[in-house]
Every structure is written in C-alpha cells, then in structure tokens.
Amino acid sequence: MRQPLVAGNWKMNGSRDSIKALLEGLTAGMGVVKTAEVAVCPPYVYLAQVAETLKDSAITWGGQDVSDQESGAFTGEVSGSMLADCDCKYVIVGHSERRSIYAESDEFTARKYAAAQKTGLVPILCVGELLEEREQGITEQVVARQLDAVIEMSGVQSLANAVIAYEPVWAIGTGKTATPDQAQDVHAFIRGKISSLDATLGADVCILYGGSVKGANAAELFGMSDIDGGLIGGASLQAEEFLAICRAPDAN
C-alpha cells in the first residue's frame, strides 16, 4: 500500500515572519491529517528556521534544488550534503521552471538526481510536457525521455528511493488543471513504463500530481488509482488551503 505524500514547494516566496505564521498554522492543524505524509520545501535560506520549528512535528522538509557537484568552486550552488546537514529528507529535482527558465537538460537533471541520492536524499523527480507538446500528442514521449535519462544514469532500481511528480507545465501556476482523467492517464503511463522494467517497483513507486492543485479539486485528483498525492505550489503558502489538500487522501 503506497502512502500518500503531499509536498509543498514554496518556490521563491516567504520571509521569517510569514514562514513562522505558516508553520504555526500547519503544525496546529496536522492533527486532522490522518493518511498523508506532509513535507515542505522552503527556499534555502529558511531551511534552518524550518528545521528548528518542525523538528518535533510530523512534517518533513526538503530543498527545492540541488547541485550536481559535491563541493568546490561553484558559487551560488548548494550540495546534497549541505541539504542533508540541514536534516532534509527530500529535494525537488528537474522542476519545469529549472528545465524551461534555466535550460537544464534531461542529462543535467539526471546528474542532480544521482547527486541527491548519493547523499541520502530522496529526490522528487519532476516530469511533464509543455502545452505545445500536449497539443502535438507527444506527452508520453516527453515524459518517457525525461524518465529514461535518470534510469540510464542511475538504474531503474534507484526509483525505489525516489518520488516522481508529474507536472504538466501548462497547468503550473496558470489556474488550469489537468482533469483527473488526463492526470491519471499520464500517471498510469509512468507506472506502466516502470512496471515493464520491474513490476514490483512499478507497483510501489510514489507518483505525485502537480499543477494548480487546490483543496477543492484535491480529493478527486488523489482518488485516481495511480495518483499518490501532490507537489503543491501556491496553495502550500496558505496553511488552511494546504491542510485541506493534505486531508484529501483521507476521503478516498
């Protein structure tokens, strides 16, 4: 039985005061979350604050990105060992904003994924298609290519210690959401692709959906057979809305 996971990606948002208020709201409301594991991914500079606040709570935390390098003269980069030193459990790898805005390739993303696992972190590997790619009918080819880069570098068994997040790029921060059936179709494709290489692993791997998930649509999305939770953007910055999403798996 796969445990649902709801992870909040705060992106480049927050301040000491706003994060303090957000975490107070989340920790106070966690008693109503029965099923899902809950994680938050703050900007690097607030990891220490988050770790200190959440150390005795049920909420885990992670980084939003990681360097493919272990250490050295890489100004501005943050290594996996640094994230691990902040007691991170997770790190987001290959988010569409990294791929599109910063032109990070599939191969570069695969190196980051490998670097994360080398330091004991659990990568949340993001995959997904652009609007024009969906309109061209090549969603599965794009997602397969992104997965293959990681599998070729780290092996399919590495996915036993990873989470996959399907995020259609056209639905991130746009207010548009893939229908539950559209999301399920891609999740089923991902699970089927992995199952073709290792049936047990395919059945067990956690696959999240990301893309304008809200409290109002989370239960229907998470009710799909191959959707195991969500990677949540803007809604994770509001305690009550995020908690509503975290409660959604309890309804299924």
Image: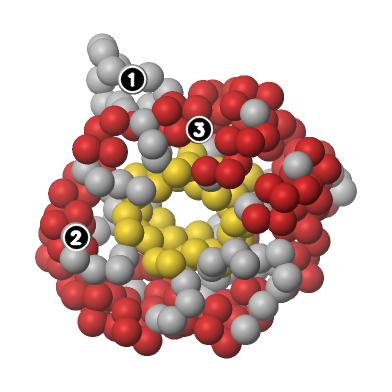
Cα distance, mark 3 to mark 2?
25 Å
Q: List the residue tagged with mark 3.
A: 113
Question: SS class of the residue under badge 3?
Answer: helix
Residue at the image position 28 percent from the left and 38 percent from the top = 84
Density class for disc 2 (Cα within 10 Å; few <14, some 14-19, many ≥20) is few
Secondary structure at numbered mark 2:
loop
- In percent of width and height, residue 207 lies at 62, 56
Residue 60 seen: yes
- Where in the figure is residue 46, as x and y percent of width and height? 19, 50
Which quarter of the image is occupied by the N terminus? bottom right
Instruction: Work out whether mark 1 precedes mark 2 in sequence or the reverse, and give the earlier one.
Output: 2
- Please name the amino acid that badge 1 sits on: Glu
Three-letter amino acid code at the position of disc 2: Lys
Look at mark 2 in the image and give the residue it sits on: 55
x and y, in percent, of residue 223 in the image = 67, 78
**Residue 104 visible in the current orientation:** no
Q: Quadrant of the C terminus?
A: bottom right
Q: Which residue is mark 1?
A: 70
